[in-house]
Amino acid sequence: MPEPARRPERRAPARRAGVPARAASTARTERTARGVAIAAVVAAEEGARANLELPRLLDAAALGPRDRAFATELAYGTLRMLRACDWLVRQFARGDLEPRVRATACAGAYQLAYMRVPPYAAVAATVAESPARARPVVNAVLRRVADLVAAGPIPWPDLPTRLSYPDWVVGRLREDLGEERALAALQEMNLAPPVSVRADGYTQDLASQAVAAYMAGLLGRARPGTVLDMCAAPGGKATALAPTVPLVVAADIARPRAALVAANARRLGLGNVAAVVADGTASPWAASQFAGVLVDAPCSGLGVLRRRPDARWRVRAGDVERLAGLQRRLLAAAAPLVTPGGLLVYSVCTLTRAETGDIGSWLAASLPAHQGWQPAPRPEGELPWEALGRGALLLPQAAGTDGMYVLALRRGS
């Protein structure tokens, strides 16, 4: 699971100093789809999480289904392609633009370059959402962007700008996955994700569903028992496992996130999910207590950037190694909790070698066969998992899902 997002580090689009988070988005009530989308972009740049802020803005605006869909595509699309849109705007803007004006211009550029909204509609309607004093500037910039887009292939300065990612993300994935696979993954994560809904009504990507089903299948081969989901929020995997085991202990270090797990379990009518507040690195549980322990660890989230469009601007290069250290600490604390014959399952929604294959190698050294640990069979089924060490990797482009890594080890009896 990705670590809770932080305020963005600026390589391409920047946070403006001195402006409090959400100030721009709460200063007015938006009434149009474009206004809602622009407010969501401003809020995300000032530190809010887009997946929380956009629904609030949509509800306040009381838009119809068509306008809600347009606002969602425009907000999330602009945030995904913010570096590219910012570059388009900066070709024709003189000096820095204030946050709302810049967000408005970028939203207009996104409509012109990616949504293919007719130029007259994109320019006129977007200019109308600008502060009055800035309308001449936004109008002039967007008309020139429209001309550039209409003239043919856009002359992007470099690959990271064209794909709209920080330089380090592109470089890291090219190094870890290879050129062809990295570019395909980055391109796939610039597309809006499909909505996948489980039979019980919970919305969850197919890759996450597959991890829960994989663990449930492995548990089904042994005697059922209590399962611990060590980093459970928001509760997707815990609630997916619940119908297959007597009890799921769903832990999270943050009380509000543990409360979210409890709320989701109640909504689904699951009485065997016990949400608790606990630090997985300082385990409060006794040894050999759980038939299965899932460590769906905090990670850089570089496999779910299509679903969390603003996350690419928040995660930093140094986070990968820092999080890999946290993942090792969580696994070291989790392993003793597994009963003989039980399972330890590790999963992350990222693609970096440090958080996937390297963790698998570390586990092989830390929990070797002579201590009674053996790798479980890799996942099988409809999704095209590929072997990575003793675990399995699912690339975003392989089946249009989130990127995911999973590894399961069984403790000797």
Image (cartoon, helix red, strand yellow):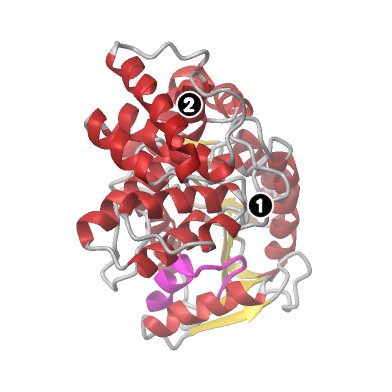
Say which amino acid is labelled 2: Val
Q: Is residue 404 magenta?
A: no
The residue at the point 39 percent across, 30 percent down is 139
- Magenta stretch? 226-245
Sequence-first tag of 1 and 2: 1
Name the residue tied to disc 2.
89
Say which amino acid is labelled 1: Arg
For residue 202, above or below residue 259 = above
For residue 167, above or below residue 243 = above
For residue 22, above or below residue 98 = below
> Residue 153: x percent and y percent?
33, 12
**Quadrant for the C terminus in the image:** bottom right
> Residue 357: x percent and y percent?
60, 37
- Is residue 150 or residue 341 the one in the foreground? 150
Is residue 325 at least partly visible in the picture?
A: yes
- Is residue 157 or residue 352 the one in the foreground? 157
Determine the image quadrant of residue 141: top left
- Is residue 43 or residue 127 the one in the foreground? 127
> Residue 387: x percent and y percent?
47, 36
The residue at the point 47 percent across, 53 percent down is 40
* Local secondary structure at mark 1: loop
* Local secondary structure at mark 2: helix
Please state if 256 lies on the left or on the right of 187 as rendered. right
> Residue 148: x percent and y percent?
35, 15
Q: Which mark identifies residue 6? A: 1
- Outermost residue, bottom side: 271
Is residue 346 at least partly visible in the picture?
A: no
Determine the image quadrant of residue 140: top left
**Label 2 crowd (10 A; few <14 / some 14-19 / many >=20):** many
Please state if 384 lies on the left or on the right of 54 as rendered. left
